[in-house]
Amino acid sequence: MRIMGTPLTHIWKERDVASVAFSVALQNNINVHDHETMVFGHVILDEGSGYKSGDGIYTAPQSGVYVFTWSITAGTHSGGHDVYTNLVVNGTPVGGIDSDSDASNSGSSTGVVVTYVDYGDHIFIRTGSTGSIISSQSAKSTFSGWLLF
Ligand SMILES: [Ca+2]
């Protein structure tokens, strides 16, 4: 296979991207308070071994531009309170979403951030409100990321 006359094998060699990707999920419904680090207990994938399921923190195993994404579903039994969450890099919020539930409907939101991180930087999801977060077969709350280049 060729792109504009250049064999694909040559393109892959030039890029030389390491295998770094992770995807983790909440195992159960949880109640949260403001300013808590979310701990996603189910590790679906962790190429590069950056994620610690004990504290929920992803430590970048390599410097580069990463894509991070997280999906959070706020439950109805929160009393209708929306759940706010931030993607935090070394203590600084770089993205935020509002998972908007009400008294009779749960609500999901997904955030995406593309940013440069250094080797050893800490990336995690932090709550910005109290509330309940759902993680079931039908509405899985997840946190994922991968090295782009
Ligand atoms: Ca609402």
Image (tube, helix red, strand yellow):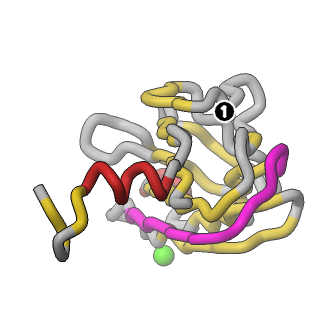
Assign a secondary structure to mark 1.
loop
Magenta span contains residue 118 = yes
Please state which of residues 24 and 72 is positioned toward the viewer in this rendering: 24
Report the residue at 25% width, 43% height from top.
138
Q: Where residue 143 appears, x then y in whole percent?
A: 53, 48
Report the residue at 62% width, 64% height from top.
65
Which amino acid type is marked by label 1? Tyr
Q: Is residue 135 above or below residue 90?
A: above
Q: Where residue 120 appears, x then y in whole percent?
A: 84, 44
Question: Label 1: few (<14), some or many (≥20) within 10 Å?
Answer: many
Q: Is residue 66 left or right of residue 92?
A: left
Q: Find the magenta span and give its range.
A: 107-121
Q: Is mark 1 within 8 Å of ligand 1?
A: no
Is residue 72 in view?
no
Q: Is residue 1 above or below residue 4?
A: above
Which residue occupies the extreme right position in the image? 91
Q: Quadrant of residue 130?
A: bottom right
Report the residue at 43% width, 28% height from top.
44
